[in-house]
Amino acid sequence: MNSIHHSPLLPISPSTVTESPAQTKLAEDAQSMSATSVSAKGEVSSTKNSFNPYINGFRGFCVLLVFAFHVTNSGLISVSALPTPSRDAFLFFTSSWRYGVELFFMISGFVIVNSLRRHNNIPAFLMDRCIRIFPVWVPVNFCIFVLASLLGWKYFASTTLADKLWIFVANLFLLPPLIPTPVVHPASWSLTYEWLFYLCAAAAFSLSLRQTVKRPPSMWILLCVLVACLLMLLPRALFFLPGVIVALSWSSWKEERRLLRFPWLSLLVFLVAWRMVNLDEARPTTVAIMQILSWPGILYASLAFIAGLHLFACVCNGSGATRWLQHTSMQVLGNISYSFYLWHPIVMFAVKKGVTQWLLPRAGWVWSAAIFALLSFVIAFVISSLSCRLIEQRLAKQLRAWSKKPTSVIATQSTTVTAMAISSKGGTL
């Protein structure tokens, strides 16, 4: 085994932000994120294993933004009666809420840098990510295919059993949208982006480690070219970088706290500027990058990136304008945000079926849209809370404990069980 030392990316006094210690379902993020505590005066101090409620509350805000986008784009809200300018403004701004996913990417960029610092071991880091992503995603994917069959998803009605199995397996391993296979979950593409980011981050971390064998510069060049190509094909992944930048330069941001003001103005600029670029394509394509590189796309993309970077730095710092993120409601949503992110589209699909069939013809679109939003949120909240407790906390904890067992211990336990079985049958080992 090669002798591996600490990466130069590791600070002597790491300034990372942890998730809530009361929620073991975020244990891996709690240890991987920086411990930036906020005093009563709003001052940030780097105390290891302390808890920053702003990051956790920001998760809740992001998932609310995505949920609101799905409500306003459900087809139940009618804006045809509005004057044309008002209708266009409403549709423009509400469609920008889908970029709550990019805000999630910023959090991931921050978390992954510190997760790599914590593990200082690529296989352990990747295993940790698998345990974070798949225990919730597997039952979600399964439920999608069950509901698609029961509720009559049109696409499935025209496919063979073999095609259905292939779509199931491809989506289970998050291959779409990288391959030409239907994406069955509206949010699964972002998990695919996450994994591409994990692999690129792991490669960069591996190259940064001081090892007995010095890495040639060509390896860094190759990695940079690969990342550039991925960003050209998947430009929405650009917003992992603000989180990475903040994580790698947090001490500098703390010294410039006077700049970390007006975060919600930055949020507005980010949403409007990125909406002007108007990227909605998750599949690899050169059309999206041409939208950015053309004028004025490059101006809007630059504004969105700078505004996103400033917004996320403000959130990490815990400035006065972000203090409402500490509210209990935002903390609870932050704790269940991953489960809510994956479960709520399925709930909305089922609820919309009932609303459009039974309520819309009788009550009109106003009541139908309001009840649709309320029922969807409540049901998704309950399911996500159970998913968080049973899967993200209990199951993930067991999986982590199992994954950390030395191979020799597992082999010894297996041999002991086999020996006991043979002995009980009067045989010899």
Image: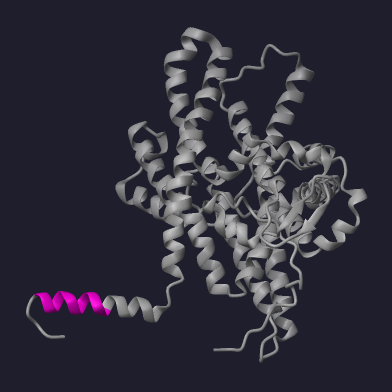
Question: What is the chief secondary structure element of the magenta stretch?
Answer: helix
Please tell me how many numbered marks the rendered image carries: 0
Q: Quadrant of the N terminus?
A: bottom right
Q: Give the residue at x 42% y 15%.
A: 358
- Report which quarter residue 220 is drawn in: bottom right
> Does the magenta run of residues contain 232?
no
Q: Give the residue at x 46% y 55%.
A: 134
Viewer can see residue 232: no
Q: Position of residue 163 (x, y in %)?
A: 36, 50
Q: Give the residue at x 70% y 50%.
A: 52
> Does the magenta run of residues contain 418?
yes
Span shown in magenta: 415-424
Q: Is residue 6 above or below residue 153?
A: below
- Report which quarter residue 336 is drawn in: top right
Q: Position of residue 17 (x, y in %)?
A: 70, 56
- Report which quarter residue 46 is drawn in: bottom right
Q: Is residue 378 above or below residue 310?
A: above
Residue 249 or residue 174, whichever sits in front? 249
Q: Position of residue 150 (x, y in %)?
A: 33, 33
Q: Is residue 352 above or below residue 51?
A: above
139 left or right, relative to 226: left
Q: Residue furthest top?
A: 362
Residue 108 or residue 222, whichever sits in front? 108
Q: Give the residue at x 42% y 47%.
A: 390
Viewer can see residue 273: yes
Q: Residue furthest bottom?
A: 212
Colour scheme of the rendered structure: one colour
Q: Quadrant of the C terminus?
A: bottom left
